[in-house]
Amino acid sequence: MFSVPQSSKSEFLDKARQAREERKGHKEKEKAATQIQALVRRFLCRCRLQKQTRKEVDDYFQLSEAGTTKRNALSIFKIARKLLFIYRLEDKMRFEKLCRAILASMEVENEPKPDILQDNKLVTLYLTMLVTFTDTSTWRIVRGKGEALRPALTRICENIMGHLNQKGFYSTLQILLTNGLARSKPSLSKGTLTAIFSLSLRPVIAAHFSENLLRSFLLHIMSVPAVVSHLSVLTPEVKTHDLLRKFILFLSREEQCLDICVCLEGSHSLCLLGNLIQLGYLNEKVLEEEANHFVKDLTDMLSYCQRYVSQKKSNLTHWHPVLGWFSQTVDYGLNESMPLVTKQLQHLWGVSVIRTLFSDVLSKKLESQESTPPPPQPSTSQNNLPVKNLFKRAFQKSASVRNILKPVGGKRVDSAEVQKVCSICVLYQTTLSTLTQIRLQILTGLTHLDDLLPKLWAFICELGPQGGLKLFMECLNNDTEESKQLLAMLMLFCDCSRHLITILDDIEVYEEQTSFKIEELITISSFLNTFVYKMIWDGILENAKGEKLELFHSVHGWLMVLYERDCRRRFTPDDHWLRKDLKPSLLFQELEKGKKRAQLLLQYIPHVIPHKNRVLLFRNIVTKEKESLGLVETSSASPHVTHITIRRSRMLEDGYDQLRRLPVNSIKGVIRVKFVNDLGVDEAGIDQDGVFKEFLEEIIKKVFNPALNLFKTTSGNERLYPSPTSYIHENHLQLFEFVGKMLGKAVYEGIVVDVPFASFFLSQVLGHHHSTFYSSIDELPSLDSEFYKNLTSIKRYDGDVGDLGLTLSYDEDVMGQLVCHELIPGGKTMPVTNENKISYIHLMAHFRMHTQIKEQTAAFIRGFRNIINPEWLHMFSTPEVQRLISGDNAEIDLDDLKKHTVYYGGFHSSHRVIIWLWDILSSDFNAEERAMFLKFVTSCSRPPLLGFAYLKPPFSIRCVEVSDDQDTGDTLGSVLRGFFTIRKKEPGGRLPTSSTCFNLLKLPNYSKKSILRDKLRYAISMNTGFELS
């Protein structure tokens, strides 16, 4: 009775659902309406803002064009920010006006405003107030009758300054100064800067230079970048009050100096250092009187900075433009002012300060300096120094030579004079190791005075009871502060001298003898050679660390610069570099046992070992490698043999095709050659190294022939180097690599080949051009002596080099076309001036000897080093490597040749033809003809480096009865006839012949000595005997 009908319930639910949907629809409509209204309001707001902004922009440009407002950088920046914020396509004209305004403002000299205050007038106002209320001298009230008030008013001023100091007065002035000066163009006016400095100085003066206020002044004012540079021009107060002396004495106490350094950290310490150095430069008298304290202060500050100087980048280091990688926080805001700070620092190694600090050294006269003979005239050949004349001048009269050719001793090392010089040297050595990014500038400054280094060497020679070497060797074994200072002096001398000799050219070293006389270089090189030898041989280097290791590298670097200069152009006497107390046999024994000192000696100063012993060591190293690779015949195994077939008409092509793809070990191993003649028939004979020797010699002769254009010859002495135009060969780089392998094979097998290389090219093969001390200009004479003279004449040109019309480019005639090579990007538009002429000379030398042939040289070296380990050649100088390739340049030792000659065909050492032959060679032939004879038989005019015992195959002489085409070899009858001098017929019409592949001389059994002499002379001059037996 009470139940609700089913239909009524469903209707009720439908109505509820419809009501919910209607309410939801209304809500969505309201939300949509709200969003639409927000979008419209936002759009209208943007339109109003854009309209207002455009009006502001238009008004600005209208006023600017009318000239009623000043266009400065700040106003343009503000208006540009607004325009770019609302920029649309319709603003194209406005954007054009903005661009014009920016370009116009670039031409206007806008005075920058200090960053900390927007209005420069406010700065001036506040500074004027402070200047007025910290000094009563300008107050009208104290004039005349008010003089009695002065003490009280002065006290008020002092109270004001005291209050200011408590409130961070110096910190505020530091911020003002830094923001105004730490930029490329200072923004503080003369009056503002003078006012700031006067204000900062008044509390210090009022407190009678108390330590507390001096500390604040140093920390906040003197650490502002280059503040003294600006002040020295604007106000004389910087020189008054004896400020420098007070600063020096304050910092001379170690704890106070350390406190300043810790508070400032690296960048600001460097700024303080620059300001102190400039003050010293401006106050020469104070610097002279307080030199010891000044040097100590700078050394302590630099030493503190040095703790944080790192050799490489890491997560803990920051880059600094003067210090390099630095492990303290770097204030990059100071970077803009670093050029000015660097300019201040440069005074330390400027002439004025050096003369003041080194006055004790420079005041000494080098004995007989005026009576030194004049330098010799330049020789016609750049590389032919009259060595005998140099030696004669060096040793003929002791009175005509500076009295420093040998250590004299006499000065006590604990004397005040020696201690002062040592501390100065420590200062400069610390400067070099701390200011890493301007190291070359420092060295150049220290070498500017021609007489400083010679006089410093004279000073070194006077130290100790016996002078020189013994004292410094004792210092190496002592760890006292005195010893460290003495070694620092030696290190500074070596670093500076090495830098000087590196930048001097041959004319300045040999003819003009700038700074050092040749005799001094001889003595110095002897000292350095002994010092380095003893450091190694006495075991000091093995355990050396830190300063001792740096000292070794410094002394060794200077030694090697002199040695390489001597190798290039001789100035020392014979056997100058050898250590007569070193027994090669002992050295080799220690090398066999792996002793460290022997390895270090061979690594650093191999030149102290006689050259022949080093060649013998080289041959032993090669032999050991052959044994380890299984390339030597043993009782249990035979080496792998590579067979190749070569057509005589296409020797280079066939050799290249068959050998270039061989593995390196196969090329190092045994290679057997079979020749095919022009008719395609195999030539008779079995290659037992002789035929391969001929093949190698012929290949090398062909590839180094300048007509092939793989290699060119230098002007004058006709020595070989890669041709810059070798690219005319399609595969020229592969050919260079092949040539390198073939030459390496010749050296590996001990086969001497007559290939004279230009020394600059051999230097690159040895890797010398990667050395820090390598100078392209020094090697240039070996390429073109005339070109070298022309370049060095630019260096010595007294007028304006710009008048010569040169640019940083090189014009070259390449196969009939003029090609311009830029030495640096854009070089053809950059003129050569007096400022960049030294760079031009070095760039030109580097281009001619390196850049032009870079790819060819790299390919050749790659091939050569595949066969010859570069470490093996480190024991040889450039001329010695040439001798390793081409044999000894000494005269032929006939006794040695006779001793190691093998006879065939009935000849023997007592045979009359053989006796005649040796007599003709020794008595009738001159040195040139003997060289031609050796080349006739062996294909090389020079004897083997280790003597004829090492000639492979051995030198042989065979008696022949018939011509080569009828010769079938020795028979019992021919040998007996040769032995007993029985002739089938008179051989007077036949010439001697040779088989160079076997080093074999084929000699008819002549009846008269005169016939033998004439025929042999004719044969060697015509070179008729280059045949295969």
Image: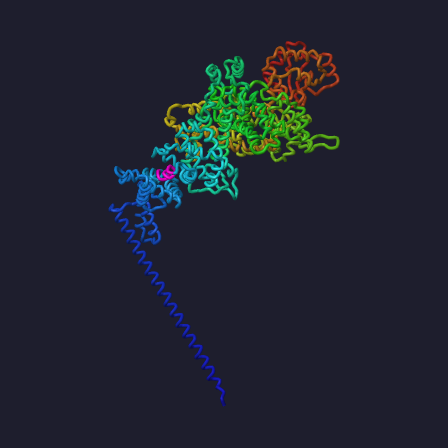
Q: Is residue 558 visible?
A: yes
- Tell me where residue 266 appears, x and y as whole percent: 47, 39
**Magenta stretch contains residue 64:** no
- Name the residue located 30 percent from the left edge and 56 percent from the top edge: 51
Residue 107 sits above or below residue 811 on the image = below
Tell me where residue 480 sits by quadrant.
top right
Number of numbered tags placed on the structure image: 0
Residue 657 sits above or below residue 123 on the image = above
Range drawn in magenta: 198-206
- Tell me where residue 687 appears, x and y as whole percent: 68, 27
SS assignment for the magenta stretch, majority: helix
Q: Is residue 655 visible?
A: no
Left or right position of 10 against 468? left
- In depth, the one of 93 and 236 nearer the eye is 236
Q: Residue furthest front?
A: 148
Residue 700 sits above or below residue 220 on the image = above
Left or right position of 931 against 59? right
